[in-house]
Amino acid sequence: MMKFPKIDFPQLKSKLQVKSPWDRIIIMLLSLLITIPVFIILHQNLIDLKWAFNLDRVFIFIIVFAAIFFFLMLLRTIIILCIALYLLVLFYGTVIGNYGFNEISEDYNSMIYTMSDNPYPQDIIAAKLLPFPNKSKIINAIEYQNPKVRNFAIMATTKHFKNVKGYSDYRTIIQCFAVFKEINGRWNYVNDPKEGDYIATASESLAYFSGDCDDHSILMAAAVRSIGGTPRLIHTKGHIYPEILIGSLIDLEKVNYLIKNVLFVKESYGKKIHYHIDDRGQVWMNLDYTATYPGGPFLYEEILGALTLN
């Protein structure tokens, strides 16, 4: 009778596990990268116990790090393989000039910076997880730090509403409305190629002020953000349009007065101001290319996704 060799399953499992001394270091670094945004969310949402030297926050950070590290170590073989595969993808992206190491580093740093300056940092994570067509391409195209984009926005603020006085608390919004007036006064709608979506960068659209709805939204968001405004892009059925953060309902009343009585008197005469209120009670006003004044009519009502640019 043929005898089969006895299999020592614990020994086999041990052989399949990653043996390299670097695995612990890699898991530790990954745990740190995950812990930082999680800690920021907890820091902003948990009550400050006001312990000396912020020891309560130190303990939270340590506990979160330890929990994530322990969990990842349990799955370290799978995690290491996934990391190796992802590094290969990033290396390929870097070589062909697509999304690579530099881009992921910039995205992570930008996310942490934005979360640390936001009272609701979890919204930043949620916004990145919401379905939005061509999200990564659109984010990269919103070149709000490009000198050409900022110079254009500054030009618009000197051309429109420069002499409006007495509204210092709303100076940034007034200047963003100047950007809106300049862009929408010059925008020429042009369809994408039949082969698919063409995502133009903000600086590219400055050449001819032409393109489709996503090109307009990208330019508007970039210019608004370049001078301190907070834009977001709304995805509806077959359409994308930009909105700007106004603030509270009290701010809405004052901005509504500005639009109808100071800035866009003729354009908004007898017309309704359109806006959305998010789950935080913040008011966002429509800046679509179809509108002749901020808060113009929505082209489509149903929101399928939102991309906030803090």
Image (cartoon, rainbow, N blue to C red):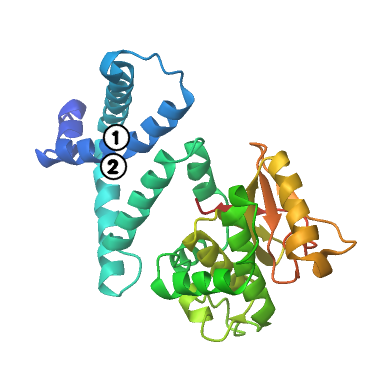
Residue at the spot 63% in from the left edge and 65% down from the top edge: 163
Residue 246 located left or right of residue 33: right
Question: What is the distance, in whole Å, between disc 2 and disc 1 at their CAs?
Answer: 6 Å
Residue drawn at (80%, 62%) of the image: 297
Compared with 266, 126 (above or below) is above
Q: Is mark 1 on a helix, strand or loop?
A: loop
- Viewer-nearest residue: 30 or 78: 30
Are dots 2 and 1 in contact, CB under 8 Å? yes
Which residue is label 1 attached to? 75
Compared with 134, 75 (above or below) is above
**Residue 282 percent location from the top left of the image:** 65, 41
Label 2 residue SS: helix
| Residue farthest toward the left in the current orientation of the protein | 21
Q: Look at 68% across and 63% down and name the residue there.
A: 287
Q: Quadrant of the N terminus?
A: top left
Q: Can residue 201 be seen in this view?
A: no
**Kind of residue sitting beneath label 2:** Ile
Q: Mark 2 points at which residue?
A: 79
The circle drawn on residue 267 is none
Left or right: where 255 falls relative to 110: right
Give residue 147's position: percent from left, percent from top.
Answer: 39, 72
User: Which of these two is toward me, 230 or 307?
Assistant: 230
Residue count near mark 2 (Cα–Cα under 10 Å), binned few <14, some 14–19, many ≥20:
some
The picture quadrant where one finds residue 290 is bottom right
Total number of numbered labels?
2
Q: Which amino acid does label 1 sit on?
A: Leu
Residue 243 lies, in percent from the top left, at 65, 57
| Residue furthest right in the image | 270
- Circle 1 residues within 10 Å: few <14, some 14–19, many ≥20: few
Q: Is residue 58 above or below residue 265?
A: above
Q: Is residue 28 left or right of residue 141?
A: left
